[in-house]
């Protein structure tokens, strides 16, 4: 088999364009040819399958809707037979969700119609550059496509995953932010898996779980005798990630003193073990994450500004699950399949979609895994956690207890106080001393409340009524 991936900068790479619309196919082919690619065109999946073994395809650009054939079929065939080929899906805005599903199953990227020449050129050049930086391969080996880690259809999720696809092939540091449970470590692993470092280690470090006095030793290592209990030399987690990726989760939990040393490691590309005078060169890509607003942490002086800008070369914000409700059902179905071959009743799915999921994807996964383990062959509403079943838009649930019925719009506290004081005042027929006693305030405080809330003097009102009656 021919191999055009990495035989020199002047070698032209092969691209296969698959689309049943001639105008679209010709536009893509023309732009790629002008950029130096060898291009073949196919108007259908069958035509593509006939020629797929004729060349060592660097890239395949395929429409997700090919008449009677699903573009995902083409994707699966190429990822199975030629797994190193970069497959890019083309889709209209109305079917963007299908394109995102394709990226979850191994597609390199996707283009949304209508696209222009600049979009095509950017795609062609980014793929070529990535292929040139990858390790030279003598031939393509058949490998298993990993289980998709990221699933979603919502617009906010698509936007975030689009960034993942664009930045994965680079060595830029990435800052992931979002609430706890939104899947920051899963995204970090996906960035690593799509990069040229995929064959090297991925080392995750939970900075918030390591005591401040131990984090330097854990991350950078130590020399024997450098502190009490250091009975041998130890390689740090950063060095273990050499050639791969180090993921610094909850990086904002570190102390300013440690942040200085972390900044040096990023700037110099080298680490110094605790108790050592020597530095060791380490080539590791850094992905950091936090569930806090990092800019606010910087303003408050809890996180170094220079370190923030160093880590924040690319920023990806992961939306909470309540802002991507269209993703709840596919996520739940995926979590269920991973554990048992079970289905959901329509009523159970509606209950899942209604709940706000304060614990985000992690909470959803735990709920579904539990339900799948306890149900018979179908997950019904009764199999879901009580807090999920009991939730309604006007009900607050804590633990297993429904604690309060809440209006859709909460009135201000001053309004509630005014109503309460007025009712107590009416109950005592305008007797301020009795009203003050019931409210557990002194009379002067009550008079200030009456004045503040413009409560009328009931005794004068009663006198007026008596005069009218007489």
Image (cartoon, rainbow, N blue to C red):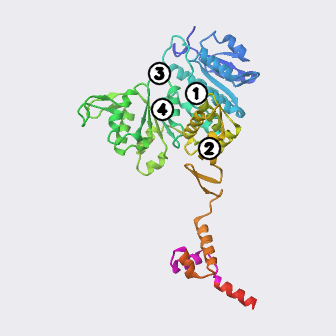
Mark 3 and mark 2 lie on one chain; the one further toward the N terminus is 3
Q: Nearer the viewer, residue 374 or 145?
A: 374
Q: Secondary structure at mark 2?
A: helix
Which residue is disc 1 drawn over?
Answer: 148
Judged by its main secondary structure, the magenta piece is helix
Residue 462 can be seen in this image: yes
Q: Which quadrant would the N terminus be assigned to in this image?
A: top right
Query: Where is residue 372, by image quadrant?
Result: top right
Q: Quadrant of the C terminus?
A: bottom right
Q: Which of labels 2 and 4 is toward the front?
A: 2
Residue occupied by mark 3: 199
Q: Of the numbered discs in the image, which one, if any, rests on residue 172? A: 4
Residue 252 drawn above or below residue 427? above
Tell me residue 199's x, y (percent).
Answer: 47, 21
Q: Position of residue 276 (x, y in %)?
A: 26, 32
Give the CA separation, mark 1 to mark 2. 21 Å
Q: Earlier in the sequence, mark 4 or mark 3?
A: 4
Name which quarter of the figure residue 159 lies in: top right
Please tell me whether mark 1 or mark 4 is closer to you in this view.
1
Q: CA distance from mark 4 to mark 3?
A: 18 Å
Q: Which residue is mark 2?
A: 323
Whole-percent x, y for residue 105 in the image: 61, 25
The mark nearer the N terminus, 2 or 4, is 4
How many angstroms separate mark 3 from mark 1 (CA)? 18 Å
Which tag is nearer the camera, tag 3 or tag 1?
1
């Amino acid at each position: 088999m021919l191999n055009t991936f990495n035989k020199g900068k002047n070698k032209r790479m092969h691209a296969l364009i698959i689309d049943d619309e001639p105008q679209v196919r010709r536009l893509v082919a023309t732009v790629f040819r002008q950029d130096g690619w060898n291009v073949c065109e196919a108007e259908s999946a069958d035509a593509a399958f006939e020629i797929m073994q004729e060349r060592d395809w660097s890239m395949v650009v395929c429409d997700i809707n090919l008449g009677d054939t699903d573009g995902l079929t083409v994707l699966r065939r190429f990822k199975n037979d030629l797994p190193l080929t970069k497959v890019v899906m083309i889709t209209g805005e109305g079917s963007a969700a299908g394109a995102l599903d394709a990226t979850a199953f191994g597609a390199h990227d996707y283009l949304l119609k209508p696209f222009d020449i600049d979009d095509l050129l950017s795609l062609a050049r980014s793929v070529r550059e990535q292929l040139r930086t990858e390790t030279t391969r003598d031939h393509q080996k058949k490998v298993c496509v990993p289980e998709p880690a990221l699933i979603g259809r919502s617009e906010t999720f698509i936007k975030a995953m689009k960034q993942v696809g664009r930045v994965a092939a680079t060595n830029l540091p990435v800052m992931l932010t979002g609430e706890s449970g939104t899947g920051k470590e899963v995204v970090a692993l996906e960035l690593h898996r799509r990069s040229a470092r995929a064959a090297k280690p991925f080392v995750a470090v939970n900075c918030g779980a390591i005591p401040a006095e131990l984090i330097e030793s854990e991350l950078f290592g130590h020399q024997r005798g450098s502190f009490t209990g250091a009975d041998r030399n130890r390689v740090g987690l950063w060095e273990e990630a050499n050639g791969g990726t180090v993921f610094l989760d909850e990086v904002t939990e570190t102390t300013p003193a440690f942040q200085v040393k972390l900044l040096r490691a990023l700037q110099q590309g080298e680490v110094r073990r605790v108790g050592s005078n020597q530095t060791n060169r380490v080539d590791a890509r850094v992905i950091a994450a936090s569930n806090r607003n990092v800019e606010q942490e910087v303003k408050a002086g809890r996180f170094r500004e220079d370190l923030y800008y160093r880590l924040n070369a690319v920023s990806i914000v992961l939306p909470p699950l309540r802002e991507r409700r269209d993703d709840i059902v596919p996520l739940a179905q995926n979590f269920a399949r991973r554990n048992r071959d079970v289905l959901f009743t329509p009523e159970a799915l509606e209950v899942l979609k209604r709940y706000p999921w304060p614990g985000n994807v992690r909470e959803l996964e735990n709920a579904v895994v539990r339900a799948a383990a306890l149900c018979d062959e179908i997950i019904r509403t009764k199999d879901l956690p009580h807090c999920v079943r009991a939730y309604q838009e006007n009900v607050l649930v804590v633990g297993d207890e429904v604690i309060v019925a809440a209006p859709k719009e909460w009135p201000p506290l001053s309004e509630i106080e005014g109503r309460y004081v007025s009712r107590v005042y009416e109950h005592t027929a305008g007797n301020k001393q009795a009203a003050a006693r019931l409210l557990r305030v002194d009379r002067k405080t009550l008079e200030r409340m009456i004045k503040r809330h413009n409560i009328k003097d009931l005794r004068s009102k009663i006198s007026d009524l008596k005069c009218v009656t007489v």
